Image (cartoon, helix red, strand yellow):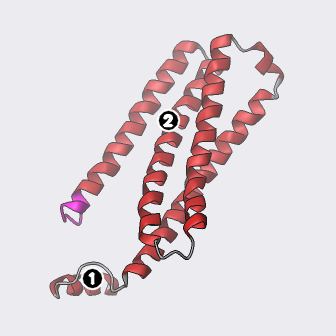
């Protein structure tokens, strides 16, 4: 409550946001990005582990050619998500102590959004793959459609919240 009151008073005083230097803001934003990457990469690691385990099961040898292609596309997407998620750390390492943290934050923000987009598609693909193998190809298509709609709805919700925040609407 006290935090809310101080935020309101800072706006009333003509100042926006937090009382921090641009360097402190960049540090805080990069730390936020790293926390979010930890969540995204943990999910990606779990999916990658699942995909790795599938290849070493006896049932894998019985997959139809189109199922193997589906599987390999998922492995590629998993690798892409992992690499995208690691790139902000690489960018930070390569530009460490060069006083360009705000640029690192902008690039890392875009990479994090790309990571989340690829992970979203990966979840749809893995869901479809599992349903197709366990139930039927038709069930896999339905699972892809339903999970795709859910992903789109969640992205739309997130984008709407962003739009409201940019427009200055607190809720």
Q: Give the class, few, some or many, for how many residues have Cα within 10 Å of label 1's Cα (few <14, many ≥20).
A: some
Question: What is the x, y in percent for residue 17?
Answer: 29, 78
Instruction: Tell me the distance, in whole angstroms, between the alpha carbons under discs 2 and 1.
Output: 38 Å
Can you tell which of label 2 and label 1 is closer to the viewer?
2
Residue 86 belongs to the span the image colors magenta: no
In the image, residue 4 above or below residue 94: below
In the image, residue 43 above or below residue 141: below
Dominant SS of magenta comes to loop
Which quarter of the picture shows residue 18? bottom left
* Residue 130 visible in the shown view: no
> Along the line of sight, which residue is nearer the eye, 131 or 65?
65
In the image, residue 126 above or below residue 31: above
Which quarter of the picture shows residue 35? bottom right
Which residue is the site of mark 2? 121
99 sits left or right of 149 in the view: right
| Label annotation for residue 137 | none
169 sits left or right of 111 in the view: left
Residue 165 belongs to the span the image colors magenta: yes
Question: What is the x, y in percent for residue 164?
Answer: 22, 58
Which residue is the site of mark 1? 7
Give SS at disc 2.
helix
The region drawn magenta spans 164-171
Give SS at disc 1.
helix
Q: Residue at x 48, y 59 (%)?
A: 108
Q: Residue furthest top?
A: 64
- Which numbered disc flags the more N-terminal residue, 2 or 1? 1
Which quarter of the picture shows residue 156? top left
Q: Pointers 2 and 1 in contact (CB under 8 A)?
A: no
């Amino acid at each position: 409550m006290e935090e809310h009151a101080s935020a309101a008073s800072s706006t009333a005083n003509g100042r926006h946001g937090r009382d921090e230097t641009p360097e402190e803001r960049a540090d805080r934003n990069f730390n936020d990005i790293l926390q979010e990457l930890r969540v995204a990469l943990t999910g990606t690691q779990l999916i990658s582990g699942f995909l790795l385990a599938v290849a070493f099961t006896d049932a894998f040898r019985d997959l139809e050619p189109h199922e193997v292609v589906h599987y390999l596309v998922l492995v590629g997407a998993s690798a892409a998500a992992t690499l995208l998620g690691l790139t902000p750390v690489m960018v930070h390492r390569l530009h460490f102590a060069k006083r360009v943290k705000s640029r690192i934050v902008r690039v890392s923000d875009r990479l994090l959004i790309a990571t989340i987009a690829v992970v979203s598609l990966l979840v749809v693909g893995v869901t479809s793959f599992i349903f197709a193998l366990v139930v039927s190809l038709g069930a896999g298509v339905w699972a892809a459609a339903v999970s795709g709609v859910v992903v789109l709805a969640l992205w739309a919700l997130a984008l709407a919240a962003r739009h409201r925040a940019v427009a200055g609407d607190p809720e």
